[in-house]
Structure formats: C-alpha cells, structure tokens
Image (cartoon, rainbow, N blue to C red):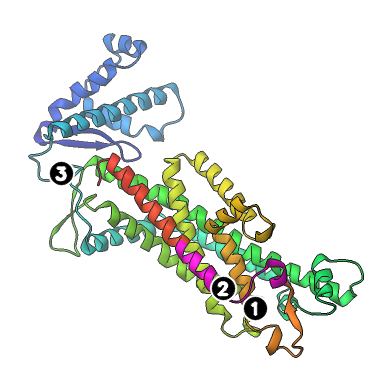
Amino acid sequence: MLRLFDALYVLAPGGSCLFAGPPYQLKDALNHVLLENSNEEEEERRGGGGSFSTPIEQLISLSCCGSEEDSPKKKKKKMILAKLTESHDQAEEQLQLKNSLSLQPISNFSSPSSSASFSLASSAILLQRTLHLLLAHRWRWMLFCYATYIGYGLFLRLFFRFEAMVAEDGCIAIQGGGGEAFNLAQGRCGASESTLESLFLVMDNLRYTHFFAVFYLTFVYLQAAFDYQADLELFVNEHRNGNLKLLTKLSLTSQFLGSYSTPTFYLVHCLSESLPLLLLNLLYVHLTNYYSSVKADIFWHIYLVLSLASLGFQGLAHIFSLVSRGNTALLAILSISVSLLAVLLDDYLVLQHRLPLFFRLLSHLSIPRFVYEALIMLQYGFGRCGPSSTDAAKVQSLFYLMQITDEDYGFCLLMLLANLLLYRAVALLLLLKKANRWRLW
C-alpha cells in the first residue's frame, strides 16, 4: 500500500523529521540506522529480532515512543529515533550542498531554504496562525500567567496601607541650613513621634514602589522567556522539516507552513505578546494606583512608565532565551543573575551616587532603575512641595537623598525607550545570526 504514495514524510515527537523520501527507501533507511547502533543491537538484528519486516509499523512505533512507560525498550527506541533524525539532517545538508532535493518533483514540498521575504501579507497570515495556537493550545498557560499578574496586584492592594502612604508627602522644612532634613533622612534621635511616623510611611511607600515594579517585571520576563523559547522551537522545526502547502479559507492563494521570513516571525511574535500585555498593564495599574487622589493625571504616567519597562523586559527575555539555546536550567541561572544585578542597580538598595563608577555606568542598562526613579518623581515631585505647598520653605526629602529633580523624569522616559529599542534590536540581530546558521535567512 505504501508504494501507492510518491513520498513519505514522518515527524518525531517535538517536530523533528524522521524520514522524507520515496517509500522504497524506508526499509533501507531503518536498517542502515540499526547497523550503526550498538553491537548488542546488531547481534539482535542478525538474529532476527531487529529486522524491520514491517517498516512503517516500526516507524510509527518509534515516533510514538513518548507514550510508553520508562523501560529499556523505550530507551532503545529513543536511541534509534535520535539516529534517524541525525541521519536525515546529515542527508539533507548533503542534498543542499548538491542543490538537488529528493522531494523536488513533488508539489506539496519545497526546500527549507526557500523562505519568503518580509511582507505584511505573510505577517497577517502568521498572526492568524499564532492567535489560533494561543487560543487552542496555550490558553491554560496564558490564563495562569495573567491570573498571577492580577493576583499579585490584589496582594499589593491588601498588604500596604495605601491611604496613609498617599497622604504623606515626604516634605520637610528647611531649618538651620538643612540640618533637620539631614537628621530626618538619617533617622537620628531627637525627632518627634509624628516625624518618625511620617518617615515610616515614606519608607513603606518606597518598598511598595519597589515591589510594584520589580516583581511585576520579573513575571513579565519569565512568561516572555518561556513563550519565546517555545515559539522559536516551532519556527525552526517548520523550516527544517520543509514547507507544507496549506490552503486557507481566508485566502484564495496557496500559503506555505514555514515560508515566512525571520523578521516576519519576530514581528508577529512581538505583536502577539505585547498587545495582551499592554491591556494587562492597564488593569494592573488600575488595581494598584491610589495616587490619583493627590495627582489627577498620574494614572497615565504610571501606565506609560510600566509599559515601556515591560516591553523592554520582553526584549531582554528574548536575548537570554537565544543565549540559553533551549536549556531551561541555563535560562533560569541567567535570569536570576540578571534580576539580582538589576535590583542592586535600581536605586532602592544602594543610591546611585554612592555606587562605584563602573556600576553607575552599568546602571544605565538597568530598566528597574529608571522605573523606580520615574515613579518616585511622579509620586513626590512636580509641585508636591515648594511653591504649591502652604509652606514655601519645604523640600522633598527623597529628592535630597537620591539627588534627583523633576527635570530627570524626561531623562528616565528617554532611557526606558532607549533600553527597549536596544534590547529588541539585539534580540533581532541574534535571531538573524542564528537563522543564518540554520540557513533560514
């Protein structure tokens, strides 16, 4: 019955190609892999136990070995499966070097190197496929991630005393050449009980601002890293396995699985993960923002800062997903290391002007630093003390400590945008470099 087909195309678990070619070559391919196996398996084949009398049944059994229990039989099948995949990849490389493909006469297959150039039409088609993948297969994972974000926002809402923190403006009166401001900042003895309570409320708000930004961005980073790793594996497998013709109801022309370019893949991936995140940021800020009672327009400023930061963190996640090469353990180590470094440079644990020069320069690449500083300026700056206050001889104690002014807010937005573009550009360049090595670009 197999001889009725012009060609066979069999995939292993994970999307790797096991066999591609005319049916009469199937038995020879299986026997060739078995000959290269261990001496024990070779003896078994010579004795009759390893002969592939029914090749397609053996091939199906190999491709479905993931459903069996862990046993020596399963390990043997996995070893043969890996050799089949390696053998197919080596044969494919030789055919590409000779510029002749065994499946070239068949219209349902095309060369993996025939990727289309970037176009909006291919991006729209791939976006439809991606949305279908998310809604049909990844909705549980997405629901878990989004529930985590919302749950964390509700936790912050219940844990911190927002009303008291918002009422405290952090302003102090200048007396004796600023001595009282210095004593309050250092928490020295002699301050009144009300002054200490005000200081504690300011410290609580600093902790809230830190947790509001850093941990939320960490959740965004983790989701983006794992999603990008999964999409990248799918992207590579589709190109490596060939481009299967797909007739869509939305288009009268034939489209091809995998016939989209590397920039198209990255653009669609960024859109599919960024648009839901922007909506989620809106809900998260709505749950955790209590400062509209003191500043009417602060909501959209917080949303802008958080959105720039979260989009930048997605680009950073793409970089480390590519660097880790699919190794989840390495990705976790890199993520933890970068997160700890970012926290140390975010102006919360250690003030920027007290850092060594090297770390001060390195902190310009730290997204949490500019998020934290921008939020502090929005909460305590822009006229909350000074001329708009009842007492003109007041200054902002946090600005005094951090050595920042209202004018630095624009610089923070500029650096957030610069880091966003930098990380996205680096991620795209790394992807293009790897795609060139995979012969996909």
Residue 138, percent from left and from top:
42, 55
Q: Which of marks 3 and 2 is in front?
A: 2
Residue visible at 65% across and 52% down in the picture: 356
**Amino acid found under the numbered disc labelled 2:** Tyr
Q: Give the range drawn in magenta.
A: 398-418
Q: Earlier in the sequence, mark 3 or mark 1?
A: 3
Badge 1 local density, few (<14 within 10 Å), some, or many (20+)? many
Q: Is residue 172 above or below residue 441?
A: below
Q: Mark 1 points at which residue?
A: 381
Q: Mark 2 points at which residue?
A: 409
**Amino acid found under the numbered disc labelled 1:** Gly
404 is within the stretch colored magenta: yes
Q: Do the residues labelled 2 and 1 touch (CB within 8 Å)?
A: yes
Q: Is residue 289 left or right of residue 318?
A: right
Question: Where residue 110 is drawn, which disc sits there?
Answer: 3
Residue 63, percent from left and from top:
31, 33
Nearer to me, 219 or 302 = 302
Q: What element carries label 1?
A: loop
Q: Is mark 3 on a helix, strand or loop?
A: loop
Q: Earlier in the sequence, mark 3 or mark 2?
A: 3
Between the residue at mark 3 and the residue at mark 2, the CA separation in whole angstroms equals: 53 Å
Between the residue at mark 3 and the residue at mark 1, the CA separation in whole angstroms equals: 61 Å
Badge 2 local density, few (<14 within 10 Å), some, or many (20+)? many
Residue visible at 44% across and 49% down in the picture: 319
227 is within the stretch colored magenta: no
Residue 115, percent from left and from top:
20, 49
